[in-house]
Amino acid sequence: MFDPATRAVEAALAAGATYADARVVIRRHERLSAQNGELQSVRNSLDAGLGVRALVGSSWGFAASSDLGDEAAAGRTGAEATATAKASALVPGRGIQLADVTVAEDSYETPHLEDPFSVPLDEKVGVIVGATQTMAGVEGIRVASAQLMFWDTDKWFVSSQGHRIHQHLVESGCGMDATALGEHETQRRSYPQSFGHVETGGYEMVRRFDLPGNAQHVAEEAVQLLSAEPCPSGELDLILESSQLALQIHESVGHAIELDRILGWEAAFAGTSFLELDQLGSLRYGSELMNITADATIPRGLSTFGYDDEGTPAQAVDIVRGGTWVGVLSGRDSAHLAGLPPGGMVRGDGFNRMPMVRMTNVGLEPGDSSLEEIVSETKHGVVMATNRSWSIDDRRLNFQFGCEIGWEVRDGKRVRMVRNPTYTGITPRFWASLDMLAGEGEWHPWGVPNCGKGQPTQVGHTGHPASPGRFRNVRIGVTT
């Protein structure tokens, strides 16, 4: 599949582009869902095509085609990308230049043990039907749902600078939830996190998370929440388990450090950023325990790959070091403008979307404690787990999160389960209150498979490694 991409790049240059690249992408997706012991759906989809970027002066042009068998179609797509760039360049603007990267001819494949598309359908159906049967059998559960999801993606990338890269990416995910209905409210528990967890790798991850084996306690917790006391309110210590801390990172760090938002190039869906480029290297983002990296090489991370969609190799980039903001998420064009090395963070959602800056595995490095040690050293606080709701302003400063479940802590012990736990904060002040972090043994590479950005909307797969952590004197139990 290098040939259509090569033909498209040649046509874009012949039409007047100063640079061009092309991706042939073939992506297969499978999703299975079950509810209350019955199979609801098995959906399979396949999309395949060619996407071309062309650069003329101050503007990019993009065109796509699903016709991979016609050399002339590939040529027309390349020429259309250049024509779009020329039209856009009629509006005066600063010329775009690309930061240097090493030109590569290479291949990459996601490490995996079991091809999820080769696992018998009956076996996959049995997992989710069995899990929902168990949850639905717990008295008080009204709805029990489970799902499996898999992606298999091949990409062939060619650039006018000489890149020729093939990648085979495999992603697998699973999740389930139980909803209990009470007299005045409903309560829900999810596993392993809300909206399901996805990571790079094969079907072995489904076996590792063992949905049927965890179904009983997930459903029982949902029922117990109906009679739990409300979350206490006030300024208390907040202990976040790792999947909620992962979403906290995504919303209050990941989107804020996207260089296209900082530069004002992108504002759709998630707004801009409170960060300004001249603060890089000096802005205090959090406490000295706050060490954030964007690392596209982490095993099982949902944003782990060999190269991004500009041919920049996967790498680890420091974002916050010792609490100071030191890095950004960038592409070759934005990095050159900012005078920074490119971080390899540009990806597109399929063949027919323009690649843009997307989070890789933006994660919080572990500390040297444990969740139980954190609890034992807390006088009065609340442990919160599993995201239920989120809201954050369009500069990524003021936020409020709700979780599915909480436990009040007094004098170093969990004394009771609490329902509808919430907390609120302002990003730098919140992160400055981080004072304890669990260690590597409780550090998990959580995946977020539904990150929206851009217009038309693109759905990105992002990763957020984290371990449980404690934040001091946070406003908890907010209801408005």
Image (tube, rainbow, N blue to C red):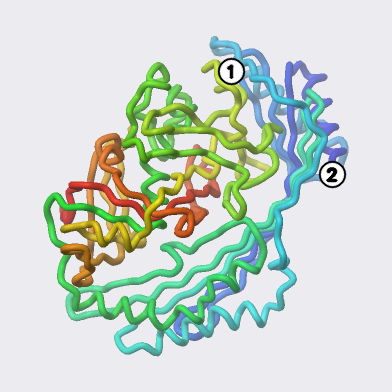
The amino acid type found where label 2 is placed reads Met
Q: Residues within 10 Å of mark 2 (few under 14, many from 20)?
A: some
* Quadrant assignment, res 309: top right
Is 240 situated left or right of 254 in this image? Answer: left
Number of labels in the image equals 2
Contact between marks 2 and 1 (CB within 8 A): the answer is: no
* Quadrant assignment, res 119: bottom right
The amino acid type found where label 1 is placed reads His
Q: Secondary structure at mark 2?
A: loop
Residue 27 in view (yes/no): no
Report, in whole angstroms, how far the alpha carbon at label 2 lies from the one at label 1. Answer: 30 Å
- Name the residue tied to disc 2: 1
Residue 474 placed where, x, y %? 20, 47
Q: Is residue 241 above or below residue 69?
A: below
- Name the residue tied to disc 1: 336
Q: Earlier in the sequence, mark 2 or mark 1?
A: 2
Residue beneath the point at 54% across and 11% down: 93
Residue beneath the point at 63% across and 15% down: 97
Q: Please tell me the numbered disc located at residue 224.
A: none
Residue beneath the point at 62% across and 47% down: 304
